[in-house]
Amino acid sequence: RAIDAAIDKNAVVQVALNGQGSVSDSMLPECFPGVVTDGAPTYDPEKAKALLAEAGYPNGYDLTMTVNTKYPTSVKIATAIQAQMAEAGIRVEIEQVDSAAWTDMKKAGKVTCGIGNWYVDYNDPDSMLYPMSDGRTDLSSSFFHNDEFKQLMIEGIQTEDTAKRQEIYAKADHILTHEQFPVVMLYNETMFYLKKPYVKNFEVTFTYRTMFKDADIEY
C-alpha cells in the first residue's frame, strides 16, 4: 500500500509510453467485466511515509527492484519510480539482469520487487487475474496466497451467470489491488496500428488480436 502511494503513475505513463496510456488501479482493463478502477491517481508521498511508519519503518525502507534488461521500458519505469519513491523514504536500488537470470530469480523467489506486464490470452477476466492464482503466483515470485481470493477464482470459472461473475471478479480484483497489494498496477497501454485504405473488414479486437476472417483487399 505504501509503494502504491509512493508512485506517480501519470508521470510513469509519460516516461514509459510518451503519454500513450491510461493510469490504472485495477488488474482488469476498463473493458472487462468486474473492473473496479476509476483511474484516479494515488500518488501521495506523505501517505506513503505514514503507512511505512505504521508498518514499523519510520526511517524509510530499502528496496531492491529487479528489472529484465530485455525490456527497455522496464528500465525506464524503474528509474522513474526510484526517484519518486525517494520522496516517500523508500530507497530503491535497481538491479538489472538478463532474461535467463530473471527467470531463474523468479522461480527461486529472489525477486523482492520487479517490473512486469501481462497481456490477456482470451477475452475473460480470469485470464487477467490468472498469474496471481494459487497455482501460478509462486512462479512470479510474488508468493501471494489468500484463501478468499483462491475461492473467488474457483467460483469465477464455475459460474455461468455474467452478472454474478462480474461481482466475483470485482471482489477478487479488489483484494489484489485495494486490500492486500501483492501487486501495484501502473497503467494500461494504448496500442496503435496502421492500415492501408484498400484493406477492408480487417479487425483488431479490444485484446489486440488481429482478425483476418472477413478481411479483403480492394483495388
Image (spheres, rainbow, N blue to C red):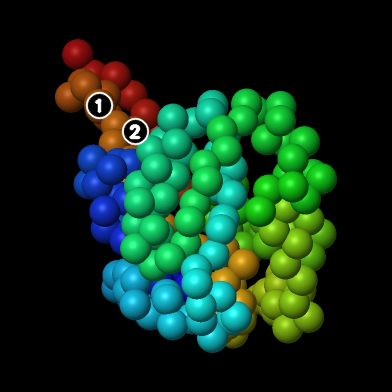
When the figure is inspected, residue 25 is found, relative to residue 188, above or below; the finding is below
When the figure is inspected, residue 50 is found, relative to residue 94, above or below; the finding is below
Q: Which residue is mark 2?
A: 202
Q: Identify the residue at horizontal 75%, vertical 62% (top origin).
A: 143
Between residues 158 and 129, which one lies in front from this camera angle?
Answer: 129
When the figure is inspected, residue 217 is found, relative to residue 210, above or below; the finding is above
Q: Is 60 left, or right, of 113 in this rendering? A: left
Graded by Cα atoms within 10 Å as few (under 14), some (14 to 19) or many (20 or more), the crowding at tag 2 reads some
Q: Identify the residue at horizontal 45%, vertical 36% (top origin).
A: 75
Q: Is 133 left, or right, of 25 in this rendering? A: right
The disc, 2 or 1, on the residue closer to the chain's N-terminal end is 1
Residue type for callout 1? Lys
Q: Identify the residue at horizontal 65%, vertical 28% (top origin).
A: 99
Q: Is 156 left, or right, of 54 in this rendering? A: right
- Whether residues under marks 2 and 1 lie with C-beta atoms below 8 angstroms apart, the answer is yes
At numbered mark 2, what does the secondary structure look like: helix, strand or loop? loop
At numbered mark 1, what does the secondary structure look like: helix, strand or loop? loop
Camera sees residue 142: yes
Of badges 2 and 1, the one in the foreground is: 1
When the figure is inspected, residue 162 is found, relative to residue 185, above or below; the finding is below
Q: Which residue is the extreme one toward the front?
A: 59
Q: Which residue is mark 1?
A: 195
Residue type for callout 2? Phe
**Marks 2/1: CA distance?**
9 Å
For the C terminus, give its image quadrant: top left
Camera sees residue 116: no
Residue 83 image position (x, y, % from top left): 35, 51
Q: Which residue is the extreme one toward the top?
A: 219
